[in-house]
Amino acid sequence: MEKRYPLPPFNMETALQKVQAAEDAWNTRDPERVSLAYTVDTEWRNRTEFVNGRDKVVAFLKRKWTKELDYKLKKELWGFSENRMAVRFEYEWHDESGQWYRSYGNELWEFDEDGYMQKRYASINDLPIHESERKLK
């Protein structure tokens, strides 16, 4: 398997690069592309759902972006050490009825030595908003 740069241990510059790469990938809303950043046996907790394995990540993201329409995400690095990061994020989306939401959350990431994310734990809350309140466009 190829290495996925930048590699741990992270410094400020490489940690910021990793966060930006994740934001860019997720904003494509392409489940296959996003899944390539994770180990084949990646372990996730997303809200109350547990997702294990890259193939399950693809299925999860397909479901997610079928429900969360016009998704737009912003990530922010909060801390890092060796091969782990803490990231704050918010994203906006609307459902089929046109109701907009801003979802806030925190993620804990752990990377393997080749730069692939092996663990992702996300806690997320959704706030209904009016379309006029959107910040991310």
Image (cartoon, helix red, strand yellow):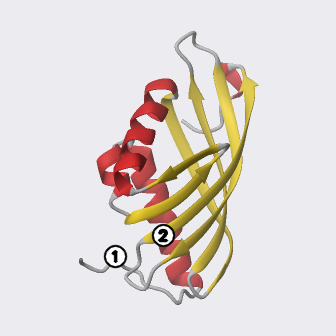
Write down the residue under mark 2: 118
Of 130 and 96, which appears nearest the observer? 96
* Mark-to-mark CA distance, 1 and 2: 12 Å
Residue 38's quadrant in the figure? bottom left
**Given this view, does label 1 or label 2 mark the residue nearer the observer?**
2
Left or right? Give the position of 43 relative to 85: left
Other residues around mark 1 within 10 Å, as few (<14) / some (14–19) / many (≥20): some
Residue 92: horizontal and vertical position, in percent?
60, 34
Residue 70: horizontal and vertical position, in percent?
48, 29
Q: Residue at x 57, y 61 (%)?
A: 120
Which amino acid type is marked by label 2?
Gln
Q: Which residue is drawn at 36% across and 79% down?
A: 5
Left or right? Give the position of 11 relative to 118: right
Residue 47's quadrant in the figure? top right
Left or right? Give the position of 45 relative to 31: right
Of 17 and 2, which appears nearest the observer? 2
Which amino acid type is marked by label 1?
Arg
